[in-house]
Image (cartoon, rainbow, N blue to C red):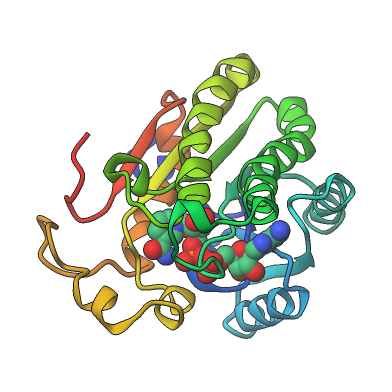
Amino acid sequence: MSTNTRFDLTGRVVIITGGAKGIGKVYAREFAAAGARVVAADIDGDAAAETAAQILAAGGEAIGVRTDVADEASTTAMAEATIAKFGTIDVLINNASLMSVLERRSWFDIPVEEWDRVMAVNLRGIFLCCRATFPEMRRKRFGKIVNISSSRVWEGVPNRLHYTTSKAGVIGLTRALSREVGEHGVTVNAVTPGYTLSDTQQATSSGNYLAMQSDGRAMGRPQYPEDLVGAVMFLSSAASDYMTGQTLNVDGGKAMH
Ligand SMILES: NC(=O)c1ccc[n+]([C@@H]2O[C@H](COP(=O)([O-])OP(=O)(O)OC[C@H]3O[C@@H](n4cnc5c(N)ncnc54)[C@H](O)[C@@H]3O)[C@@H](O)[C@H]2O)c1
């Protein structure tokens, strides 16, 4: 395999949860531009369909599938729709989460129901999406799972305690699951993005918060969704086939672990 081929995503079938908006939409667009066949799976079915339509209009291949990652029947249907359309599943990018919709507030003020819903989407959602897609990956002895965590875990960022806690869980899940599926040719890795100026994040952050976003970063500038694409593509390609259970931090050099 040549070096260039290792990074090639042409024809790969890639499910991107939360792929209709924010950073997930950028992954969907960029993977399609790299030749992948993309499934934008999102609880916002209209936005997922719109993302797929935009990819088709640009000459790429994509479908939108309304999916609630916290619901087992819905994740099973997501995997079935992917196989029905594209014949297989190569890559699962677990990007959906409850984040930008969460108020920033003291841990003491978080309603218990909100804590539970964050865990259901951000952790059970990954568990269910992995379970729904794994049988196809095991069958073909190839699969790449990329779990999106957050650099909040390294920094201990406060005021969304449930969110930060769930993202730490994503790293534990990544490590333990990698040991259960490695013998089947499936890799499981995580990425911890720094605070990223996705359209959804910008819409829900105050001016002061946005103004601080170059602080402490070696790169000296804010982070944009495009800054994450290379790392996620690497973990989705054959170039990372002997790397599993790992977590890549992509935050412009703020937290160094
Ligand atoms: N933007 C940041 O600063 C930042 C930093 C670190 C990590 N992250 C992580 O990166 C990922 C993308 O971030 P973003 O800024 O685009 O987030 P976002 O909140 O804007 O988007 C999340 C997406 O997930 C979808 N979604 C929510 N609940 C769902 C469910 N139950 N089933 C399916 N889809 C669901 C939403 O509709 C949306 O499209 C998330 O996992 C987030 O936690 C973001």
Up the image or down, 218 lies above or below 131; here it is: below
Quarter of the rendered structure image containing ligand 1: bottom right
Q: Is residue 215 left or right of residue 16?
A: left
Kindly tell me whether residue 26 is visible in this rendering. Answer: no
Kindly tell me whether residue 245 is visible in this rendering. Answer: yes
Look at 52% across and 58% down and name the residue there: 109
Q: Is residue 5 left or right of residue 20?
A: left
Residue 164 in picture, x, y percent from top left: 45, 47
Up the image or down, 159 lies above or below 2; here it is: below
Residue 89 in picture, x, y percent from top left: 71, 44
Q: Is residue 1 left or right of residue 35?
A: left
Look at 31% across and 56% down and name the residue there: 194
> In the current view of this chain or complex, which residue is farthest to the front?
108
Look at 36% across and 52% down and name the residue there: 158
Up the image or down, 75 lies above or below 30; here it is: above
Q: Is residue 185 left or right of residue 206?
A: right
- Which image quarter holds the N terminus? top left
**Nearer the observer, 26 or 109:** 109
Look at 56% across and 70% down and name the residue there: 101
Residue 135 in picture, x, y percent from top left: 79, 30
Up the image or down, 244 lies above or below 213; here it is: above
Residue 84 in picture, x, y percent from top left: 87, 54
- Which image quarter holds the C terminus? top left
